[in-house]
Image (tube, rainbow, N blue to C red):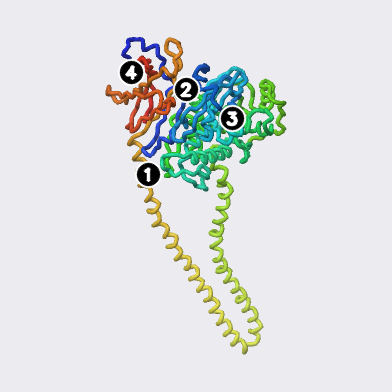
Amino acid sequence: MKSIPTFCKLNRTCRQLGAASALSVLLIGCSDWDSNNTSTANSNEDTLANTASLSLAVENNDSTAPSIIVNGAGIKGPLANAEVAAYLLDPNQMDLKGQRISLGLTDAQARLDLSVPAEYAGQGPFLIEYSGGNELNGETPSIGVLTTMLTDEQLSNGTAVYATPLTSFVIDHAYQIADRSNLPSNPIQDGLLGDNNGTVSVQEFLAAVQTSSNAMKSTLGLGLLSEQMDIFTTSPLLDGSQSSDESFAIRFTNEVFAALVAKVATAVSNSALPIGGTTVVKTLAQDFSDGVFDSMAWVNDDGVAAPIVTFADVNIASILKTDPEQLTIPSTSTAIADLRQFLMAEASLLDLNTPIEPSQTIAPEPLLTTVFEVPELPPTVLPADPVVETPVVIEPAPEVPVVIEPEPEVPVVIEPEPEVPVVIEPEPEVPVVIEPEPEVPVVIEPEPEVPVVIEPEPEVPVVIEPEPEVPVVIEPEPEVPVVIEPEPAFSNVLLDWVVPTTREDGSVLQISEIASYEIYYYADDGTTNGTSVSVAATSDTGTLVTSFQLNNLAEGDYFFSIATVDTQGNVSEFVEPIALSI
């Protein structure tokens, strides 16, 4: 392996700066891939320490300015001591984050303290993001970042919205499909308003959220989420705000999904790079962009799919089909089967309004790995196919009458029997002799049966006629190299990383102290040439940059690494290079 060059210009003082960690790589398979279809790990990743800064959380909030209180919570389970940010939702940003308009916190009992300045009323929808924090038992959440969406109407009415693993999945999935056109026959495109023009309007995104929500319910919903249920406003807490059975159903499906996300993260980490729950949720949303959990991502309307490198060595479908009875609530030792008692104890701990124990007995249906599995009924249709073939077998039956026709000849044979008395009267026997003469045509009658037998013979060319169709089937075969040829041409690679929070000497590294990142990559082709790219730490809109796409890389083995540069020019050590074959 080649050595990584050092860009540090200030002796070894650059070692005080912590390098960006948890660099992940996403291989994009062909030139038709749109940047709007990539999956990224934005803002904080699960591995970040739970040290939200109080000074950061109130830095831009003027307590004297008119504001509107935001109601809701982050649930998996309730996120305590978390940092909460509100953004104008921008569907054309990879992280959906437009301008950040407010920062807030949750307290030790997960109660939300967040408000939106009144000047932004009517400019929604808003993206609400919970990051950091801890479960009520003090454990680190299995999914470090949760998102939800707040509309103008919900803000003005004081409607509570909840950030959960499933709302995060739906929002990420809606981003993947929002620009596609409406196709009622395809559950992944039914109801969409997109026009495939590369940009997404707010109306297109909101329509995609509804389509994604329906697709999620039919696959990850375990048969527990009704079409009418709003996954963003249905409380996963037994707080009395609605039916305890509905709260139990939405919490059950979220706990199952979070447990499966944890299993996927463990499987991927065992086979490749360490990966957190937040990245798994985003990558699953990308995997489901074609309506199937199969480690392939939808690329365009031609049905071209690109492999998801993160899931390359993991059987995602097998993990997702794990029996919920075998799962435990993440960050606890409690079985999901015991969730009812767990939620009652949680409600008591949170001092909620006289919780009512759910009455229904959960009987989850199997989780589906494709949205097409519900409407498609191939097992029912296929048994009918042999019935269609039966008439083909019966067709020879008309030949049976041909065989039966000689049977009337039996009476002809019987007719000579009365000739015995005719022998007694010799004179009349003459006409009797004449009578069998007409029997000759009777014997001749089966002869026309020969052409009847011959008639099916012309059917032989009918059978032969399909043979010229063989070249018709062969004709599409030359199309295979057409599909294969562009694959080795070039690929795009998306690099994701986590924003570092500490320097190498252990001191705190503020986000505002990070100026940029140095990305270095090279091909393992025997040469000494490598390429470095400098990426600004924040975008023009002030959003943290945690990903960068390298385009048009030729086939080969590559190594990627990254370092952090602070505002003083100090450069960290490069992280251990990550290998990737293209």
Residue 4 is marked as: 4
- Residue 103, compared with residue 456, is above or below; it is above
**Image-based side of 458 in relation to 138, left or right:** left
Residue indicated by mark 2: 274
Q: Earlier along the polypeptide chain: callout 4 or callout 1?
A: 4
**Image-based side of 489 in relation to 466, left or right:** left
Residue indicated by mark 3: 162
**How crowded is the residue under tag 3: few (<14 C-alpha within 10 Å), some, or many (20+)?**
many
Nearest to the observer: residue 227 or residue 308: 227
Amino acid tagged 4? Ile
Closer mark to the observer between disc 1 and disc 3: 3
Q: Earlier along the polypeptide chain: callout 3 or callout 2?
A: 3
x, y percent for residue 147: 53, 29
Nearest to the observer: residue 72 or residue 1: 72
The span from disc 2 to disc 1 (Cα, nearest Å) is 36 Å
Nearest to the observer: residue 342 or residue 534: 534
Amino acid tagged 2? Pro
Residue indicated by mark 1: 480
- The quarter of the image holding the C terminus is top left
- The quarter of the image holding the N terminus is top left
Q: Earlier along the polypeptide chain: callout 2 or callout 1?
A: 2
Amino acid tagged 1? Val
Residue 14 is marked as: none
| Residue shown at the point (42%, 39%) measured from the top left | 199
In this view of the protein, can residue 210 be seen by the observer? yes
Closer mark to the observer between disc 4 and disc 3: 3
x, y percent for residue 477: 37, 47
Q: Secondary structure at mark 3?
A: strand
Closer mark to the observer between disc 2 and disc 1: 2
Q: Are marks 3 and 2 in contact (CB under 8 Å)?
A: no
